[in-house]
Image: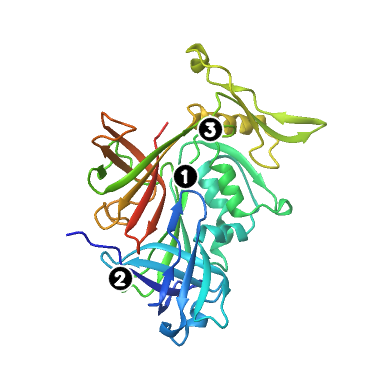
Amino acid sequence: MPTPYSLAWYACDLRTGQVAEELRSLRPTQSLSRRLGAATSSSLELALDGAPLEWEGATDPARSLLVAVDTLTDTPVWSGIPLPRKGGSDATLSLSAATPEAYLDRRYAAYSAGGTDISTIMAGVAQPILTSGPPFTINATACGTVTDYTVLDTEDKTVLSCLQELDSIEGAPEWTVDTVWADAAHTAVALILRIAPRIGTTETEGEAVFDLPGCVSQYELEESYERGKGANSVIARGEAEGGARVSSTPITDTDLLAAGWCLWEHRYSPASGITSASQLNAHAAATLGLMRGGTQAWTVEAVASVAPRLGTAWGLGDALTLAVEASPRHPGGITITARAYAWELDARADRIRPILLEDS
C-alpha cells in the first residue's frame, strides 16, 4: 500500500542538538530540498494556536534547529536553522530556515598544509565549527589527491567558501552535512560533516528505481552548452603576482576537437588568493571534466508515497535508476543510472523530485 509522507517537526537546541519541543502546527510553505556541497533553504509557517507554550524559544533565530522526521521510518530527512522570523497580528508565524551547511558560511578559516590529501585539508579547514558551534562531527575519508593549501585569517574566507574552492579541484572529494539521531532514544540530533571521494552509493545500477509508467508522473532532461555550462577548453585565472596574473595552461579536450567539434572556450577565476599555477591547472582540469559535454540534468517528479523512500531506500548522492518505457522524448524508452545530486520533497502534495546528474 502506498504510504504518504507524514513529517513530524522537532525544535532542537542548535548548540547541543537536544530536542526541545514537537511543533505539530509547523508546516513548510515550499518544498524541502538538499544539494551536495551547498546550503539550501525553505520557508515555513507556524500556526500559533496549535503551537506549544514555549514555541518562541523553540524557534529562536540562530538558537534552534528545526528537524523534519519521516514518521514511517523515524528518520530525519531535513533540518534547517531558522534565521529570519516574522509575526505580529496574524495567527501564523513565518520562518525561513537554512540547512546546516549555511552555518559554515558564518565561521572563518585559517589553515595551512603542504602535500596533503584534500580530504584532510577540508577537515582541517572545517575545524572552527567544532568550537562553540552546533553538534558537528567530521567524518573524512582520504580521496588520494594531494595539494598545498593556505588560507589566512586576514583573507576573511569562510569555511563554506574554502570547502567549495577545494571541491572544485580535479580529484577532490565531495561533502555534505547529514542530520542523524544522536542517541537510541532519539532525544537529540547530531550533524555529520561527511567528506569522501563520493557521497552516496557507488553501484553502477541504482537499486532504487523510478519508473514510467509507475511512480513517475513526469520527467525532463535538460541539456545545455550555454556560456558557463559547456566548454572544451578551459583556462583558470589566479591572482596577480609580481605584475603578472597567474594562469593555468589551456586545458583542452583534444579528442573532441579531433572528432570535429568547434573550439568552445571558458575562462574563469575559481577563487581569490590563488597564485599557484599547478592549483589553477587542477581547477581547470576539473572544470573541463564537468563542462566538456555540456550539462545534462534529469529532473524526475514522482508520487512520493509510491516512489522509493527517501532516507531509507536512497539518499543524497546515491545512484538511482530512471526506467522509461516510452515517452515523446524517448519513444523507444530509456533506462539510465544517475546520481541524486539534489532533491526536493513536498510532503503535502505527495511529490518527490530527485534531480539527477550522470557521472561523466
- Marked residue nearer the N-terminal end (3 or 2): 2
Residue holding disc 1: 174
Q: Nearer the viewer, residue 201 or 360?
A: 360
Q: Is residue 110 left or right of residue 316?
A: right
Residue 135 percent coordinates (x, y) = 48, 67
Q: Nearer the viewer, residue 122 or 212?
A: 212
Circle nearer the viewer, 3 or 2: 3
Q: Residues within 10 Å of mark 2 (few under 14, many from 20)?
A: few
Residue 304 percent coordinates (x, y) = 30, 56
Inspect the image, locate mark 1, and give the three-letter code of the amino acid beneath it.
Glu
The N terminus: image quadrant: bottom left
Residue 33 percent coordinates (x, y) = 44, 56
Q: Residue at x 52, y 72 (%)?
A: 94
Structural distance between the alpha carbons of marks 3 and 2: 41 Å
Work out which residue is located at the far bottom of the displayed protein and give it.
53
Q: Residue at x 23, y 62 (%)?
A: 3
Residue holding disc 3: 286
Residue holding disc 2: 184
Inspect the image, locate mark 3, and give the three-letter code of the amino acid beneath it.
Ala
Residue 36 percent coordinates (x, y) = 46, 48
Residue 332: mark: none
Figure check: 137 above or below 150 = below
Figure check: 252 above or below 77 = above
- Marked residue nearer the N-terminal end (3 or 1): 1
Circle nearer the viewer, 1 or 2: 1
